């Protein structure tokens, strides 16, 4: 039996994920230089990738580069308001059309600008309009009239938008973005992410593989071991579920009295005898230690009033219902409208989504805490780590933000993210141990991690594929 066939027969299916089968996967996806090289050919040029928020390119002539592995793409806004994207390479002799230095801490995050009318190559001056057509070649007669527009235009890249994000895909035969997002996109659409704007955005070069980094934010199973201070006010039992390419995690509960549609996400009741106080303490602790995100000031303030506005006998359900109602009214009074999310959608939407391959969104009606991770250079032990907070602001009150390089410390990122950072580098090191028999991910709570490797293997021709541990 040849290799692809044997891979097909052993391949973990979506059904296996739903059945929560025991699975492991090899560590080469994290550690191998050869795997990293293969990602450059088989993964990054084939997947839809988030470039930036649409609000960063609001006007005709606005442009930026998106850089991943060896690829660089120019994304621009045309006069008619539509977006275009091109490979950042001049078809003459291959100079980058826009020079993109290696990403440097504190210096280069991306290259961008405004008011573009054309792109002029710095080497021999060939020039391109915003549709990628060549408009100038020095001494074209030297080619004897044999150069065609197809030979001299820029190579186009697919571009689309979802949730207020710009996405690109370098594969001309890719599925449409809407299909790629699937049910995950439909569910998140209810939260109107497109109406949110940056609150802050930070990045760092971190000493681990990009998958090691994103996996540190894919599951709440680590909360009890890593963020022990958070256990005082809430339980962190989790579940996770595959949605094809993407997956979601939710807070689950062993205690029926906390079971309601809101309890799967960040807006949930605290534990203990007085949910009025613990709900406030839970959300306040989260907000302040996760760099003032994963909630909003409105929600924290409304929670602080629970103890005054509700009797001692209030149940967890009453607390959460009153809290959300009063926060919604407070926001309405300052011009922030909450989207109407039906309870069954709210429950299904859970806590946080892992969007294949490298984007995480922890969402609420008026906020989102998000991550993106990319490889850094040719080193499988390094990555570009980005985290940003979105929030729904009253019109005209959106803060001005830009990408800020921030070393991974508690001062820069808040103590909870610093706790997450404190694991990542040492997972990367630990997986190299000759004594490591391979990951044993929790099939119920860490399914997002298994599903990431399941989908990666599809692009990587079976390399790194998870395999079942409960069958021979
Ligand atoms: S490489 Fe661009 S004009 Fe020569
Ligand atoms: Fe964490």
Image (cartoon, rainbow, N blue to C red):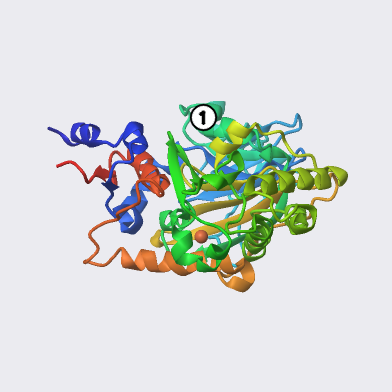
Residue 80 versus residue 430 in the image, above or below? above
Residue 454: percent from left, percent from top: 34, 41
Q: Quadrant of residue 190?
A: top right
In front of the other: 318 or 70: 318
Image coordinates of residue 154 in percent, x first then y, are 56, 35
**Residue at disc 1, secondary structure:** helix
Would you say residue 261 is visible in this rendering? yes
Q: Residue at x 67, y 34 (%)?
A: 341
Residue at the outermost left position: 1
Horizontal relation, residue 410 to residue 339: left or right: left
Position above or below: 201 against 338: below
Q: Which residue occupies the foreground of this view, 198 or 339?
A: 339
Q: Residues within 10 Å of mark 1 (few under 14, many from 20)?
A: some
Q: In screen coordinates, is 433 left or right of 99?
A: left
Residue on which disc 1 sits: 182
Q: Position of residue 160 (x, y in %)?
A: 60, 32
Quarter of the figure with the C terminus: top left
């Amino acid at each position: 039996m040849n290799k692809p066939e044997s891979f097909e027969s052993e391949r973990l299916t979506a059904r296996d994920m739903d059945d929560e089968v025991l699975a492991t996967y090899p560590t080469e996806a994290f550690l191998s230089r050869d795997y990293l090289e293969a990602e450059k050919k088989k993964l990054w040029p084939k997947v839809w990738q988030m470039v930036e928020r649409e609000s960063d390119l609001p006007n005709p002539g606005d442009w930026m580069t998106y850089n991943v592995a060896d690829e660089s793409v120019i994304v621009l806004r045309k006069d008619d308001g539509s977006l275009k994207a091109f490979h950042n390479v001049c078809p003459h002799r291959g100079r980058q059309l826009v020079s993109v230095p290696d990403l440097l801490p504190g210096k280069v995050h991306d290259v961008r600008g405004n008011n573009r009318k054309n792109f002029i190559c710095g080497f021999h001056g060939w020039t391109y309009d915003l549709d990628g057509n060549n408009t100038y070649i020095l001494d074209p007669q030297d080619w004897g009239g044999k150069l065609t527009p197809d030979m001299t235009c820029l190579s186009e890249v697919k571009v689309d938008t979802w949730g207020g994000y710009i996405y690109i895909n370098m594969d001309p035969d890719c599925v449409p973005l809407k299909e790629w997002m699937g049910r995950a996109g439909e569910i998140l659409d209810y939260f109107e992410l497109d109406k949110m704007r940056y609150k802050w955005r930070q990045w760092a070069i971190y000493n681990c593989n990009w998958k090691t980094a994103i996996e540190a934010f894919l599951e709440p199973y680590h909360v009890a071991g890593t963020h022990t201070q958070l256990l005082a006010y809430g339980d962190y039992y989790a579940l996770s579920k595959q949605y094809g390419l993407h997956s979601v995690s939710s807070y689950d509960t062993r205690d029926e009295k906390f079971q309601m549609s809101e309890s799967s996400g960040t807006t949930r009741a605290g534990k203990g005898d007085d949910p009025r106080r613990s709900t406030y303490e839970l959300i306040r602790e989260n907000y302040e230690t996760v760099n003032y995100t994963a909630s909003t000031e409105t929600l924290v303030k409304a929670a602080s009033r629970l103890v005054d506005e509700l009797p001692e006998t209030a149940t967890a359900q009453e607390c959460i219902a009153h809290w959300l109602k009063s926060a919604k009214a407070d926001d309405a009074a300052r011009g922030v409208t909450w989207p109407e999310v039906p309870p069954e959608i709210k429950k299904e939407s859970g806590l946080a989504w892992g969007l294949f391959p490298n984007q995480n969104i922890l969402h609420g009606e008026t906020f989102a805490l998000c991550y993106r991770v990319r490889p850094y250079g040719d080193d499988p032990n390094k990555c570009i780590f980005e985290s940003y907070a979105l929030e729904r602001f009253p019109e005209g009150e959106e803060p001005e933000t830009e990408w800020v390089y921030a070393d991974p410390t508690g001062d820069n990122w808040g103590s909870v993210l610093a706790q997450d950072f404190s694991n990542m580098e040492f997972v990367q090191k630990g997986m190299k141990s000759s004594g490591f028999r391979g990951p044993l991910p929790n099939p119920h709570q860490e399914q997002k991690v298994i599903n990431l490797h399941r989908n990666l293997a599809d692009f990587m021709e079976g390399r790194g594929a998870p395999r079942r541990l409960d069958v021979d």
